[in-house]
Amino acid sequence: MADETTPVAVPPAPTPAAKPAPAKAPEKAKVVAPAYRDYPTIPALKIDSMAESNPYVAAAAHNESVGFPGTLVDGWEQKAVAKMGELLGKYRSLRVYMDACVHCGACTDKCHYFIGTGDPKNMPVARQDLMRSVYRRYYTLPGKLFPKLVGARDMTRDVLDDWFRYYNQCSECRRCSVFCPYGIDTAEVTMAAKEIMHSVGLGHKYVNEIIGKVHKIGNNLGLPGPALENTLEGLEEDVLEETGAAVKYPLDVKGAEVLLVTPSADFFAEPHVDSLIGYGKVFHAAGISWTLSSKASEAGNFGMFIGNYEQMQKIAMRVREAALELGVKRIVVGECGHAWRVAYAFWNTLTGIGAGANDPFAIQLQKQLDPNYKQPSHICEVTWDLIQAGRLKFNKEANDHRIVTFHDSCNVARGSRMGDYAGGQFDIPRNIIRAVANHYVDMSEATTREKTFCCGGGGGLLTDELLDLRVKGALPRMEALNEIVQHNGVNFMATICAICKAQFTKVLPYYGFKMSMVGGVHQLVSTAIVLKSEQ
Ligand code: SF4
Ligand code: SF4
């Protein structure tokens, strides 16, 4: 029970000898895909089987470049406990999550990382307990008086190491929360733990490097403006050659109606670029003027993964600035799961795209944007509205070589909506696919829509040193895919997330599938859309 807000005295600060070793690359992990289960049973426990999964610690330069302490600060124990107190005060939900768990076990087998690894610390309740045990010690009376009796632990180096290891084995997918009778959201606990760790100087290299690139260059991939321009010109030439239509992929066009903000992977990675080609064809066919922005050349927002509001806001502000500079009437987000969650759930208050902020620039933007459209909109909402209005024509047979399924991305499925009703985020992408392809099969109900399994690479874990974890975490999705491959001949899995696309491209071969099996919804749109030749 949380009855105190003042923490008890924390352990003494470590001696210099106890300070952490500088960041060093762990041994390359052996990557092993687990065997498909005959029946999806609860896995046998493999205690500490993922204890060697060590994410790379961010170097001082990477931490400092995004405003965190370079290395673990002196007195980090007290500071981490104090930060926890700050978050408990700021986020009422976090305190409820710390107190409400009754250890009923309903969530234990719902996490893809537990299913794939068998490591009991990957059970959602155990992951929460890594923080809950510290919370109890410093913020509850029983924990202060009888720590051993209530499973309360001091904030020690061992505890911190376990946090770093196992909170970096959570993709913040929220699947476990769907099954918890109290709605406890482990993803929020993970985000809080990551925020605490970053605040005391223990950052994750991959995530901080990416955030640094966004601030310095403008996007996650570090693609500078001129390279972006070249890529887009190349796309225009390719599409003209392929279709005979002069489809434009415009950059920084003032006065365009739509600003499209999309993950930077769309600009050059396969299969992502095929969806970008599709967005351009949709706007072209519907006669909508649009532009991309070199300032907001990234929809992704890794600030969310580390639970850091300031970073999330700083990254999101680029979109507002670009929208104001270009004078657009609509803001549309491309195929990226967590970007859409940030846009849908947070842009409103972070930036005033919507009515959640009232600083002068927010008010200016609110006046500038067209109130006849949802601000922001998802590209799937745009395309589906145009299809319903009869403004797009398709040759569905062009997709006849594909038997398609759809993977619901976690952040879209459980962190956002589309359209104007609950569940629109599940129906709209499927409606589009059915409008552009003749052959569609859903995966098992237990693995789709709100119960979808994470691809295994979300939450800032899409990095090579975690490949073994990513491959193992993909097991439940691969099992569901395999079932419809065997029974229905499915050969294409569409998704609307850049991370899912990158993750599946990498892990599909470990399960005997071709990496080309994954692609975007707008890749299918691109294949089937009929364009008036303008050559
Ligand atoms: S389902 Fe909820 S209450 Fe039950 S153990 Fe998991 S987190 Fe705790
Ligand atoms: S949020 Fe997702 S990855 Fe994290 S514990 Fe829950 S099911 Fe596992």
Image (cartoon, helix red, strand yellow):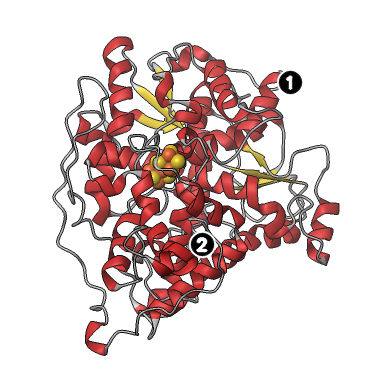
Q: Position of residue 58 (x, y in %)?
A: 34, 71
Amino acid type assigned to the residue bearing label 1 in the image: Ala
> How dense is the environment of label 2, judged by Cα within 10 Å: few (below 14), some, or many (20 and up)?
few
Q: Residue at x 30, y 42 (%)?
A: 113
* Quadrant, the C terminus: top right
Comparing labels 1 and 2, the label whose residue is closer to the camera:
1
383 to 296, vertically: above or below: above
| The quarter of the displayed image where residue 492 is located | top left
**Mark 1, secondary structure of its residue:** loop
Mark 1–mark 2 distance (CA, rounded to whole Å): 37 Å
The disc labelled 2 sits on which kind of residue? Answer: Pro
Residue 59: percent from left, percent from top: 33, 75
Residue corresponding to mark 1: 389
Q: Residue at x 54, y 74 (%)?
A: 6
Query: How far from the left and from the top, in percent, is residue 262?
Result: 55, 47
Q: Secondary structure at mark 2?
A: helix
Identify the residue position indicated by label 2 in the image. 226
